[in-house]
Image (cartoon, rainbow, N blue to C red):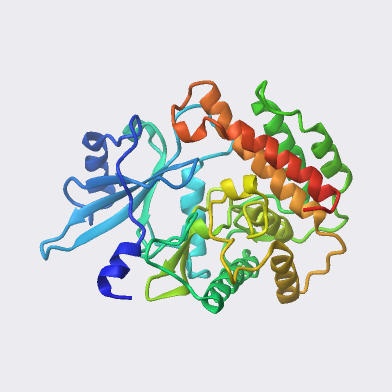
Amino acid sequence: MSNTDKQNVIDTAGQVRKGEELDLKALVPWLEKHVPSLKGEPTVAQYSGGASNWTYCLSYPADDGTLREVILRRGPAGTKAKGAHDMGREYRLQAALKPVYAYVPEMLGHCDDESVLGAEFYLMEKLNGLIPRMNLPKGLKLEHGTTRQLCLNALDSLIELHKVDYKAAGLDHLAKGEGYTQRKIEGWSARYTKAKTWNVPSAKYVMNWLKSNQPKHEHICLTHNDFRFDNLVLDVNDPTKILGVLDWELATLGDPLMDLGNSLAYWVQADDDKLAKSTRRQPTHLPGMLTRKEVIAYYLDKTGFKVDNFAFYEVYGLFRLAAIAQQIYYRYHHKQTDNPAFKHIWFFVHYLLWQCRKAIKGKR
């Protein structure tokens, strides 16, 4: 791949969405005071990926003609679920994790004064690489074996996270830990019910099944809870190499098998139905990618966990995703956002709950 081609596949931000502009008159003075290495007024672009927090790229021209780019993350406007979009928690978690988990970007600054931008925000270094979103960047084609290695490396980085000594990293205060499974089932059930609109199912069958089928034992470790290919940054010189893991908003002390179940909820494989393929957000359909069953087998083999039936974790991941999608749709439904990407999410909620029933019956 030529240098020009490499530049073309590096992930870049685009135009700022209407209504989501940054107030530079308020932001720049704060930056110059609290992050003194950032001087002057930056050029601002916004990333289109992600349906939750707003993520921007701030570009500062240097005297030698190069650009210094940093990332600013803030929560969205409108009503927020309790505990969601906590930028301070996300900032502090990554700052503590960075020394023991190499895939975390460097943290630069945090602001909890909502009068500056209307929401809490933080800044971090920008990892320059490619992000495998719905499809690989145009011009990048991976052979079957290379794609498989990328898939294995991604899973290995998740496994590595699950093996982090969170107590030694000073993260044992992050959450309660024990009792995680029950709290998550009760919590996501309550959040789904609260966010329910007239055009989605009650989901009582799925919620009751999860409550009645909780595993007797749980493992506690540091979990990401949104581990997907489009939250990974890959090296343009070697697309199988993971440079960074992004979006730590939902990270906590939890069960690693539930974390894997969360990831599998997004895992659309080559032989899935047309509707699943229409919702695909990452290139898990490519030749060389593991199937969901292969992912489970690989993970269990590498970690040594013994699981008689993975259905609970798969159903949990699907239901949790349905609840997240419904919370997003709730904001659109009540005109707290006018992002057109959220208009038809309610239909996706129906589909996810149907997939839950299929997984319960062992047919997914």
The image quadrant of residue 307 is bottom right
Looking at the picture, tell me which residue is in the foreground, 19 or 163: 19
Whole-percent x, y for residue 12 in the image = 33, 55
Image point (73%, 60%), residue name? 257
Q: Quick one: quadrant of the N terminus?
A: bottom left
- Asked which quadrant contains residue 113, the reply is top left
Q: So how many labels did they put on this image?
A: 0
154 sits left or right of 48 in the view: right
Instruction: Determine the residue positioned at 44% across, 60% down.
Output: 131
Q: Position of residue 262 (x, y in %)?
A: 66, 53
Q: In the current view of this chain or complex, which residue is farthest to the bottom?
A: 145
Q: Residue at x 62, y 64 (%)?
A: 166
Please, which residue is most extreme toward the left here? Answer: 63
Residue 42 or residue 241, whichever sits in front: 241
Judged left or right of residue 38, residue 116 is right
Q: Is residue 72 visible to the viewer in this orientation of the structure?
A: yes
Say whether residue 245 is left or right of residue 306: left
Q: As displayed, is residue 64 above or below residue 335?
A: below
User: Is 39 rendered above or below residue 63?
Assistant: above
